[in-house]
Amino acid sequence: MPPPAQTPSPLCQARRQQILEAAAACFAREGFHGASVARLSKAAGMSPGHIYHFFENKEAIIAALIEQRLERSMEIARQFESAEDIFQAMIERVDLGLNEKTDPNNAALELEILAEAARNPHIAALVREADAVRRARFQGLIRQARQGRGGDGEPEAAVTEVLTALFEGLAARAVSHPDLDRDALMPVLQAALRALI
């Protein structure tokens, strides 16, 4: 039996996060293929060899970014699940999704990952796996929100797809129209959630 995996030291975790933050900025700015390891190492403030110590290649960095983004979604789901009224928490915290999806750097990175997934079967598999986990969790949230209100409606799977398309579409809008009025969008998104959930 292999020995149990050791938890990385805080320094290793910090270095890994430093690389991921530099890579996210480089990929958003230059694209996955435009950002060389040399550029990543300069942005991260460490040697290419140091980067390869933590990640086998750029694809492994994208995989870690996908995992990190999934964990962020799961953290938001946990916040909703711990709320006394899940439906009300989802309505009140629409800003979480709105701000994240319309952040220019986040939007550019999200679209870059999707573009790479369209070309690269390995990245596509990771994106789809993360999406399946996220979808299942949010379908459960929608079900709980409806039960809390004594309501019913369209199947949770379909509602989840529409809400996902709505929020993920904000990333494309942030690139196409960077000056979009977030304050004006808030009540419209809240109304959409009320109508769908």
Image (cartoon, rainbow, N blue to C red):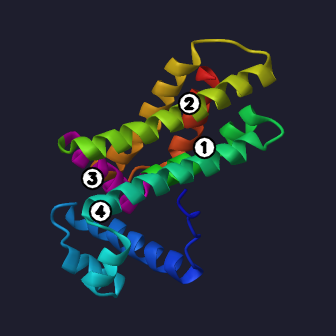
Q: Which mark is residue 28?
A: 4
Q: CA distance from mark 4 to mark 3?
A: 7 Å
Q: Secondary structure at mark 1?
A: helix
Which mark is first along the chain, 3 or 2? Answer: 3
State the residue position of label 1.
94
Would you say 147 lies left or right of 192 here? Answer: right
| Tags 4 and 2 touching, CB below 8 Å | no
Q: Disc 3 on helix, strand or loop?
A: helix
Look at mark 3 in the image and give the residue it sits on. Answer: 112
Which residues, given as a range, are shown in magenta? 102-118
Q: Does residue 113 show up magenta in the picture?
A: yes
The amino acid marked with disc number 3 is Glu
**N-terminal label among 1 and 4:** 4
Give how far across and how far down residue 179 sits, in percent.
37, 55
Q: Nearer the viewer, residue 10 or 167?
A: 10
Q: Residues within 10 Å of mark 1 (few under 14, many from 20)?
A: some
Q: Are marks 4 and 3 in contact (CB under 8 Å)?
A: yes
Quick one: 96 or 24, which is closer to the camera?
A: 24
| Residue drawn at 59 percent across, 27 percent down | 139
Where disc 4 sits, the SS reads helix
Q: Quadrant of residue 54?
A: bottom left
| Label 3 or label 1, whichever comes before in sequence order | 1
